[in-house]
Image (cartoon, grey):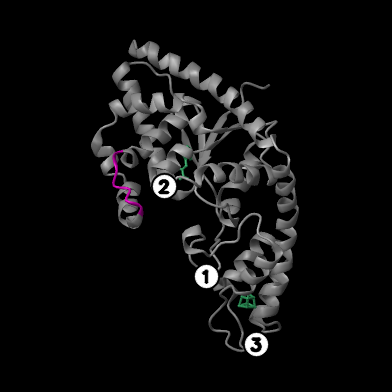
Amino acid sequence: MNTSRKVILSGMRPTGNLHLGHWVGALSNWIELQKEYKCFFMVADWHALMSEYKNTTFIKKYIFDNVADWLSYGVNPQKSIIFVQSQVLEHLELFMILSALTPLGWLSRCPTFKEQVIQLKEKDVNTYAFLGYPVLQAADIVLYKANSVPVGEDQLPHLELCREIVRRFHFIYKKKIFIEPKALLTKTPRFLGLDGRKMSKSYDNYISLSEDDENLQRKVLSMFTDPARKRKDDPGHPDICNVFSYYSIFKEDLKDEVYDWCVKAKKGCQECKTILLKYIKDFIAPHREMKRQILKKKHYIDDILQEGRKKAKKIASQTLDEVKEILKL
Ligand code: TRP
Ligand code: SF4
């Protein structure tokens, strides 16, 4: 193996079905990155617990389901290390050590913490663990000395906190063992949910990565379009139409034609959506079939996660040994 490859680590919380937003915003990028980098892809189940602690019964199901989606969309266990956070206990040990040196103010001022406490009212995340969410995330990243972390914009404050924690560690112990990770901002094209809001399971406006044809049809045909097109011969405004932005992703080479039929009112929205539907169907179908095959093989995912756990643990425990050596623990 080429050991000079730079290291990437990223994670997803197993809290629901993965949807096209995850593909556009993260997964498609992961697939590309594994060509060039040594990648660690982690199921962040401790992070899931921090917000879902009142209803934990789904976490295990989504660990398997999400990993099945990753695999069926091209995350390659031969190339990348796929593992579950809670199976590598070093994450918690380093989390503890980093917690000791992270000032409370950094965490309580973290914009994501403040927002989530307000937004996720029914989840009651005004807790001790949730405050430390970015510290665990920092431990995830520095355990593997990741050079870069592909994240969406919402995660930037966590990355910045991670870098600050690394600097503080180096300053206090006068030894530089970690890397300040860079954020690899995913270039997300404009991609919204069916109703024009952010695609999210909590809005129920998403298309899942293994959506069946019947639901796909119902969902795509119900998408919001340009409200100015009341009748078929009203010209449309593709630039503000969500359906048009889906074309940019699923059938880029038809964009000019769609633009033309829209502004010249040559086709109606229903027809436009029906054509789009076909492309989305064709996109999802092979992955959905692959996922079905994967879930049919009984130990397939277990074996991959076991293998990933071993590889991750080897590196994580080396890092933790170094840390303990420095702290004389
Ligand atoms: N906090 C991330 C999210 O909600 C998930 C995550 C946990 C993560 N640990 C990570 C992402 C480490 C990148 C690196 O999306
Ligand atoms: Fe949107 Fe297509 Fe209707 Fe134009 S024709 S407004 S792109 S759905």
Give the SS element for disc 1: loop
4, above or below 58, in the image = above
Specify the farthest residue to the left. Answer: 105
Highlighted range, magenta: 123-128
- Residue 289 appears in the figure: yes
- Give the labeled residue for mark 1: 195
* Tag 2 secondary structure: helix
Question: In which quadrant is the N terminus drawn?
Answer: top right
- Distance, label 3 to label 1, CA atoms, is 20 Å
Residue 314 x %, y %:
55, 19
Q: Is residue 326 left or right of residue 241?
A: left
Callout 1: few (<14), some (14-19), or many (20+) C-alpha neighbours within 10 Å? some
The residue lying toward the viewer, choosing from 142 and 304, is: 304
x and y percent of residue 93 in the render? Answer: 40, 24
Is 280 included in the stretch rendered in magenta? Answer: no
Rendered image quadrant of residue 238: bottom right
The residue at which mark 2 appears reads as 52
Which residue is located at x 33 percent, y 38 percent? Answer: 129
Report the front residue among 47 and 180: 47
